[in-house]
Image (spheres, rainbow, N blue to C red):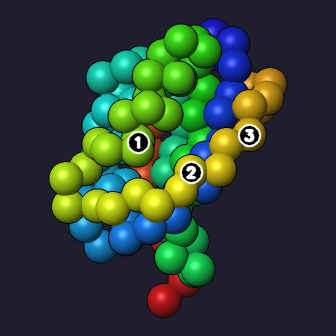
Amino acid sequence: MATTALTMTVTGSIQGVGFRYGVCEHARVLGISGCVKNNPDGSVTVIAEGDRTRLQAFLDWCYTGVRSARVDRIRTVWGQPKGPYQGFNVAIDHHP
C-alpha cells in the first residue's frame, strides 16, 4: 500500500529522448506505482506513489537519470496517495 504521493512537473530537454521510458523503468525497479506523461508545453508530469524514502531516491534520480535528457527544473508536490495504480506506466499522449 502506498504511503506517500509525489507529483513532479519536469522541464528541460526531456521529450523525444526516452525520458518517460527511463522514468518508468526506474520506478518499477524501486517498486513505485504511478504514471508519467508528456504535456503540450514540453514538460513531463510524473505521478508516483510509494514509500517516502524510495520516492526521494526516485526524485533524486530524475534529475540525472536519462543521459540523453537535460532536466532544468523539477517542481514537486508531496501529498496523500490517490491511486490505485497498477505498477508504473507511460500514459498515452493526448496532444499532437
Residue at 48% x, 16% y: name it: 54
Asked if the residue under mark 2 is in contact with the one under mark 1, i.e. CB atoms within 8 Å, the reply is yes
Q: Percent position (x, y) of residue 48?
A: 57, 34
The single residue placed furthest to the right in the displayed view is 80
**Cα separation between marks 1 and 2:** 8 Å
Q: Is residue 92 visible?
A: no
Q: Name the quarter where the N terminus is drawn.
A: top right
| Mark seen at residue 74 | 2
Q: Looking at the rendered structure, which numbered label has been put on residue 62?
A: 1
Amino acid marked by disc 2: Ile
Query: What residue do we see at 56% from left, 51% from top?
Result: 74
Extreme-left residue of the structure: 67
Residue at 51% across, 29% down? 33
Residue that badge 3 annotates:
77
- Which of disc 2 and disc 1 is earlier in sequence? 1
Q: Residues within 10 Å of mark 2 (few under 14, many from 20)?
A: some
Position of residue 40 measured from the top left corner of the image (x, y, whole percent)? 57, 80
| Above/below status of 83 relative to 15 | above
Q: Give the amino acid at mark 3.
A: Val
| Residue depicted at 46% across the width and 61% down the height | 72
Mark 3, residues whose alpha carbon is within 10 Å: few (<14), some, or many (≥20)?
Answer: few
Can residue 80 be seen in this snapshot?
yes
Tag 1: amino acid: Cys
